[in-house]
Amino acid sequence: MNHISIIGRLAAAPELKKTPNGYSVTSFTVAVTRPGTRGENEVTDWIDCVAWRKTAEFVCKYFDKGSPIVIRGSLQTRFWEDKDGKKHKTAEVVCGGVEFVPRSKGGSDTAAETFADSAEVFADDEDIRRRQYAQNHKKRRNSCNRE
């Protein structure tokens, strides 16, 4: 299963582009902090992301440089060649969903508290999805048994 969830801040304002076929797309970088090893300070990872269609339009309309963002998607690797013919490999998150960062209960905006609150939201969302899937699957089985 290829699923990734990140919480961070946009490194720059996203820019909406259109493909030759008319699809909306935006590529952007998200700064995500994590604890350092062996008592070091926090470390920031710069994660490249790409969003398509309505998700791209949503990101460009409601988020700007420094905006906190929750991203759910999948990790994709791709190969490309530069002008000089040198081959490169890139890893990026393909956004399946984007959300605003929920505020913590005390109104604080610290990364640790925001992450803890968001982790609870993820669990709740996943539980809801599982229940909906189970209900839909049960309905399909029941309708197949009747025929």
Image (cartoon, helix red, strand yellow):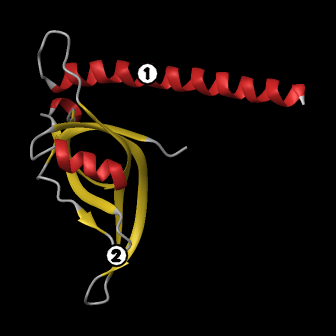
Front tag of 1 and 2: 2
Q: Which residue is mark 2?
A: 20
Position of 131 compared to 72: left or right? Answer: right
Q: Element at badge 1?
A: helix
Q: Which residue is mark 1?
A: 123
Give the amino acid at mark 1: Ala
Residue 44 shows in this picture: no
Question: How far from the left and from the top, in percent, is residue 112?
Answer: 20, 23
Answer few, some or many: residues within 10 Å of disc 1's Cα (few below 14, many 20 plus, some between 14 and 19): few
Position of 137 compared to 126: left or right? Answer: right
Quarter of the figure with the N terminus: top right
Say which label, 1 or 2, has the lower sequence index: 2
Residue 19 shows in this picture: yes
Give the amino acid at mark 2: Pro
Q: CA distance from mark 1 to mark 2?
A: 39 Å
Q: Nearer the viewer, residue 8 or 52?
A: 52
Indicate the quadrant where residue 115 lies: top left
Residue drawn at point x = 24 percent, y = 65 percent: 17
Question: How far from the left and from the top, in percent, is residue 135?
Answer: 66, 21
Question: How far from the left and from the top, in percent, is residue 63?
Answer: 16, 43
Residue drawn at point x = 81 percent, y = 27 percent: 143
Residue drawn at point x = 20 percent, y = 50 percent: 60
Q: Nearer the viewer, residue 19 or 119?
A: 19
